[in-house]
Structure formats: structure tokens, C-alpha cells
Amino acid sequence: MLHFTTSTFAELNGRQVHDIFKLRQDIFIVEQNCPYHDIDGTDANWLHLCGFDDEGLVAYARLHCPGDETSEIGRVVVHQRGRGKRYGRELMERALIEILARAPKQPIELNAQTYLLEFYGSLGFVPIGEEYLEDDIPHKLMEYRK
């Protein structure tokens, strides 16, 4: 079971920011061999959902829930040591709880790598639109409505 925190960017300390960016870099850029601009200049506009195990940060997602428009979940990532332990499901369930507490009437969107469509579908997300390439990786927009 994970311990979660949800913070604005301003509430994060330097070590936490470092750990978040390192986790995202290790998985999205190094493991997936996909050079792209992970630090996109928008982190200050998102909430940062961090999941911790006994060794530290192991799961992460950023959440955007402005309240009067579509909410978003992005940068969903689980460290290798947390895979196969249902940490991804725990992370996403917590993400939905956090967003719905802040913006209960808005749909929630995420850009899913296509190999994860079944996983996100099991959480209530449905695909919308056509498949597209983002950083040379096939994706599909998905939406969740309460």
C-alpha cells in the first residue's frame, strides 16, 4: 500500500522536485528511449500526486483540475520496483479521487499510450478520437465521466 501526498508545485521542496523529475526522466526518456521536453514549463499549473513506498517516491502523476473546464491527468509513472504490485491502479484511483473532490462535474482526460488502453478502460476511461503519435509513441485520448 502506498502513502500519497498531493501538492502544488510551490509546496514541493527542492528534493521533492528533483525526485519527481528524476523519476519522470528515468522512465519516459531513458527507459522508453524517447528524448522529449519533459520539463515543459507547465508544472507550476498542476497538482503533483506522489506515491511513496518504504524506499521513497515510486509512483507519480500530475493533475490539472481548474473546476470550470475539463480536468487532466498527465505524466503517470510507476518506478520499476513498483510494477506488478498494483501501484499504477492505486495511483490512478487516488488521482480520480483528488480530481473529483475538486472538480466533480467536469470530465477528466488523459493521453494514454495505446498499450495501456485496457488498463485505463478498467478504471472507467473510454477512448475518444483517433490514435496519434506523440513523440513517436502511439497514443489515444481517453475520457472519464462520473
Image (spheres, grey):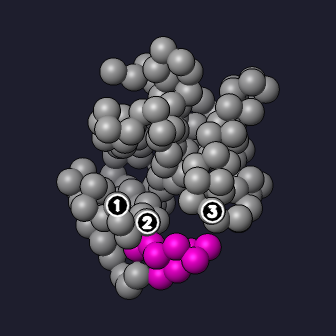
Task: Using the numbered discs, state the Cα–Cα distance from disc 1 to disc 2 in whole angstroms.
Answer: 6 Å
Q: Is residue 32 left or right of residue 85?
A: right
Mark 1: secondary structure: helix
Q: Residue at x 39, y 23 (%)?
A: 2
Q: Residue at x 52, y 73 (%)?
A: 137
- Under mark 3, the amino acid is Asn
**Marker disc for residue 116:** 1
- Under mark 1, the amino acid is Leu
> Which stretch is magenta?
132-140
- Please report whichever mark, 3 or 1, sits nearer to the chain's N-terminal start: 3
**Marker disc for residue 33:** 3
Q: Is residue 10 left or right of residue 110?
A: right
Q: Tell me: residue 106, above or below residue 103.
A: below
Q: Tell me: residue 33, above or below residue 83.
A: below
Give residue 121's position: percent from left, percent from top. Answer: 24, 59
Q: Which is closer to the viewer, label 3 or label 1?
A: 3
- Under mark 2, the amino acid is Gln
Q: Does residue 43 appear anywhere in the picture?
A: yes
The main secondary structure of the magenta stretch is strand
